[in-house]
Image (tube, rainbow, N blue to C red):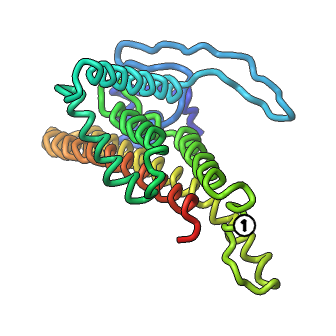
């Protein structure tokens, strides 16, 4: 079995992979590692910490490549919003970069948040706008040289989905009260013998929402990366110069398509989160 952590791809390895049908070099690019790799210039090892045993669980807080690029994305979003805020302090009418970002903010507010949440939409706008810009930045970072999309890791998408899940529950309890929200999850007027079944069904329904958010984002971002790498691998698989222009053209097309998908997935995640928050806030509907 191939050890993906120790697998280093070179042009010779790629040719060999093409001859044998080995796809380990593709999986190498979508596997988490404890170092940052900048081929062909080398790699940067990340600090490793001791494993912590807490309540029978082994927890390792050592950073990996996906964690580091997630920090980069968070820093980019933070700096971006600081620049926009400074621009608004100078002038009520945004200009330049701030005007560009305002287009996205107004779209999120008017087309996603308010239609799905209603009169209490503005209080959830900061959370949903942050989610959108953070996911979009993470997605787009995979298209820059040596960049990695943190959303290609299911742990990252699961963390985002859990954050959205807790916000959904908090919004429902804030608007309806803790007991009122829990009671409102089950339809009224049901016979008593059906009630236990409906409680289980509704509870499972709560869990499927973050699961859907997790898998949708992870699958779309990972599949796009694998398709791009597979198209590049065709050059080494066929070992024919005729394949080179065809492979490169298709790769460029998929990368342009992935730019659109990166924004689309950020939109879908934000829209579904807003929809679920609206359902929790307005249980009467």
Q: 25 above or below 117?
A: above
Judge left or right: residue 47 versus residue 226: right
Comparing 256 with 79, the one in front is 79
Q: Quadrant of residue 235?
A: top left
Comparing 218 with 127, the one in front is 127
Q: 250 above or below 29?
A: below
Q: 132 above or below 219?
A: above
The quadrant in which the N terminus is found is: top right
Give the residue pinned by disc 1: 183
Q: Is residue 24 something one can see in this rendering?
A: no
Mark 1 surroundings within 10 Å by alpha-carbon count, few (fewer than 14), some (14 through 19), many (20 or more): few
Comparing 46 with 202, the one in front is 202
Judging from the image, what secondary structure is the residue with disc 1 in? helix
Q: 104 above or below 58?
A: below
Q: Residue at x 26, y 36 (%)?
A: 102
* Outermost right residue: 55
Judge left or right: residue 83 versus residue 220: left
The picture places residue 155, in percent across and down from the top left corner, at: 58, 40
The picture places residue 244, in percent across and down from the top left corner, at: 17, 39
Q: Is residue 143 something one can see in this rendering?
A: yes
Q: Quadrant of residue 41?
A: top left
Comparing 205 with 101, the one in front is 101
Q: Total number of numbered labels?
A: 1
Q: Residue at x 48, y 47 (%)?
A: 218
The picture places residue 193, in percent across and down from the top left corner, at: 82, 85
Q: Residue at x 66, y 76 (%)?
A: 187
Q: Residue at x 17, y 44 (%)?
A: 243
């Amino acid at each position: 079995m191939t050890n993906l952590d120790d697998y280093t791809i070179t042009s010779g390895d790629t040719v060999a992979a093409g001859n044998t049908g080995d796809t380990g070099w593709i999986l190498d690019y979508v596997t988490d590692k404890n170092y940052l790799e900048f081929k062909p210039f080398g790699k940067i090892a990340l600090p490793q910490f001791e494993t912590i045993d807490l309540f029978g669980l082994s927890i390792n807080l050592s950073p990996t490549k996906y964690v580091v690029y997630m920090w980069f994305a968070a820093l980019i979003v933070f700096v971006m919003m600081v620049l926009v805020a400074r621009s608004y302090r100078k002038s009520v009418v945004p200009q330049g970069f701030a005007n560009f970002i305002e287009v996205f903010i107004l779209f999120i507010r008017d087309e996603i948040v308010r239609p799905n949440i209603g009169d209490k939409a503005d209080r959830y706008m900061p959370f949903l706008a942050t989610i959108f810009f953070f996911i979009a930045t993470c997605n787009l970072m995979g298209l820059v040289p040596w960049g990695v999309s943190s959303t290609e890791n299911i742990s990252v998408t699961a963390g985002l989905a859990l954050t959205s899940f807790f916000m959904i529950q908090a919004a429902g309890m804030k608007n309806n009260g803790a007991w009122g929200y829990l009671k409102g999850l089950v339809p009224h007027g049901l016979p008593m013998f059906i009630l236990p079944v409906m409680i289980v069904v509704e509870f499972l329904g709560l869990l499927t929402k973050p699961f859907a958010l997790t898998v949708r984002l992870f699958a779309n971002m990972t599949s796009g990366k694998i398709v791009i790498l597979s198209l590049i691998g065709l050059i080494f698989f066929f070992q024919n110069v005729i394949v080179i222009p065809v492979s490169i053209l298709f790769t460029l097309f998929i990368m342009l398509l992935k730019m659109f998908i990166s924004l689309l997935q950020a939109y879908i995640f934000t829209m579904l989160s807003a929809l679920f928050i609206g359902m929790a806030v307005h249980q009467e509907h």
